[in-house]
Image: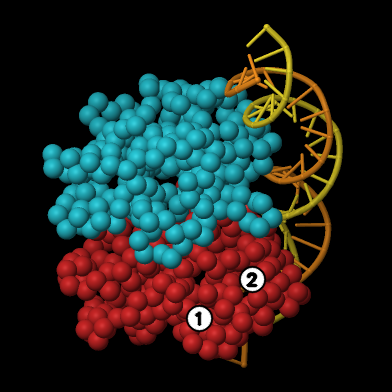
Chain colours: A cyan, B red, C yellow, D orange
Amino acid sequence: MSLASLVRKLEQFVRLSPVDHAILNRASTERVRHFAPRVDIVREGEKPKDVHLILSGWAYRYKQLEDGRRQVVSFFLPGDICDVNVFILREMDHSIGTITAVSIADLSRDFFDRVAAGHPRIVTAFWWETLVNAAIQREWTMSLGQRTALERMAHLLCEIWLRLRLAGLTQGDSCDFPLTQGDLADATGLSKVHVNRTLQELRADGLIVLKGKTLAVPNLDRLMRAGLFNPNYLHMDHEGRQLDAGMTPSDAAAG
Amino acid sequence: MSLASLVRKLEQFVRLSPVDHAILNRASTERVRHFAPRVDIVREGEKPKDVHLILSGWAYRYKQLEDGRRQVVSFFLPGDICDVNVFILREMDHSIGTITAVSIADLSRDFFDRVAAGHPRIVTAFWWETLVNAAIQREWTMSLGQRTALERMAHLLCEIWLRLRLAGLTQGDSCDFPLTQGDLADATGLSKVHVNRTLQELRADGLIVLKGKTLAVPNLDRLMRAGLFNPNYLHMDHEGRQLDAGMTPSDAAAG
DNA sequence: TGTGCAATGTAACATACGTTATTGATCGGC
DNA sequence: GCCGATCAATAACGTATGTTACATTGCACA
């Protein structure tokens, strides 16, 4: 539905000009598609022609083994861009599926060429997006390899929380949270049963309130400590610029 | 010592002109540094000024938790390029250390600007390198989240094998292999003891011959099957171009 | 306003992998 | 050509997490 999350996120990092805004605005309204929850947008082996920008809704990237074991390798939140690889690599090595209903804008090769030619701030901002995604992927490697179930879950929730906040999608200490325990299991490499146990433990410790499709984080600092969460990998600041005016203590820890 | 591995690797993917060769050649001989085995090249929190190209030797990217738990998040082999992020992100979110003695060439921002302006094939090739690294990172996420110890180890060995072969660093069915069992443990998220058990099992199954600092893979196809290895994520082909003339059956499987 | 299916919760039991400890091989440096 | 340190190998034992099974809740849709 809206470009707001992308712009808000990118502007944390570079100032975009009015012309930049106009370019992004046009690109994100020209070719929009809508998907139902729990369907695939792109499948492994395909060769999509466009880059996808998530306008609204949640999605994930996942890979699957022949025997059905499935790993979510990243989450896409509103404002995220998937598959810059599309113009270079021959085929997708993973699939992308929706969690909720999702609207996406298709960004053409042509659009990126025009941006590359005349809009360096946008280029920089897109690079930032790409590099942060790579950093997130490394951090997931760390989580899966070294963190315990509890740490892993706390870490993932912190990450999602901060990314949502950056996109302007948190309200106070709570946010929409459409992931099922099965989704969390596929993302953390844990079984569904153990995800349930782990969430109970986080609840019992007062670190999260998770009910229905809403998550509340009453004390982000404590959750971060439980997940051994160091926010540096999200690179939410740049050249001395901090996250936001009016930061809370936990904002500062995150910046 | 040599640019050969980089050029060989990139040329699998794009044809480079004589001028491109000259550019790369000059960049990789201007500012070369040498490191001893088992030292850090860059540390988390630093802000390096250059991109590093590995001319010879093996290195790794790793992250560490406060309590010392350590995860290798990727390996750098000769011809690999690290840290394109250097020009955009504020500070390193991980460290890079050497395994063997290593020679690197420092590539300046200026070099990249010149390449971007006038050498599109090199730009494309560097993009390919970056995107394949991202794909590898996703595959590691998959491995750590879903594969068993045996599958994980077999998968990692397949990956290293194919990357070495692409760089021209295999001889017949064997190659140099300077990783210790401790390195493998840090990369697979297993304990050293279990790495040892797992290697024994691979040996007993005749899938690998690993002795001293040499690895032999008598039957790559079988090792690939043991690791549920699908080489698509390495994107070793492009626009219908295949790996090599004179492919063996397992080459074909890898392409 | 039920009714059916997906999601969540719980329990009992199984196991892949971790931990600690010790021994024997390898190897670079004096 | 020894010596200390690192690396590899093996064993005994511990545990975090997986598996199977089933009950409960919640919610979309008839």
**Which residue is the site of mark 2?**
B224
How far across and down, in percent of the image, does residue A106 sit? 34, 47
Residue B69 versus residue B115 in the image, above or below: above
Q: What element carries label 1?
A: helix
Q: What residue type is labelled 2?
A: Met
How far across and down, in percent of the image, does residue A197 sit? 66, 32
Residue A34 versus residue B116 in the image, above or below: above
Q: Residue at x 52, y 56 (%)?
A: A44
Q: Is mark 2 on a helix, strand or loop?
A: helix
Of residues C10 and B194, which is closer to you in this image? C10
Q: Residue at x 24, y 71 (%)?
A: B120
Quarter that holds the N terminus of chain A = top left
**Which residue is the site of mark 1?**
B165
Q: Which residue is drawn at 46% across and 68% down?
A: B235
Q: Residue at x 33, y 71 (%)?
A: B125
Q: What residue type is labelled 1?
A: Arg
Of residues A218 and A130, which is closer to you in this image? A130
Inspect this view and state whether residue B62 appears.
no
Label 1 marks a residue whose chain is B
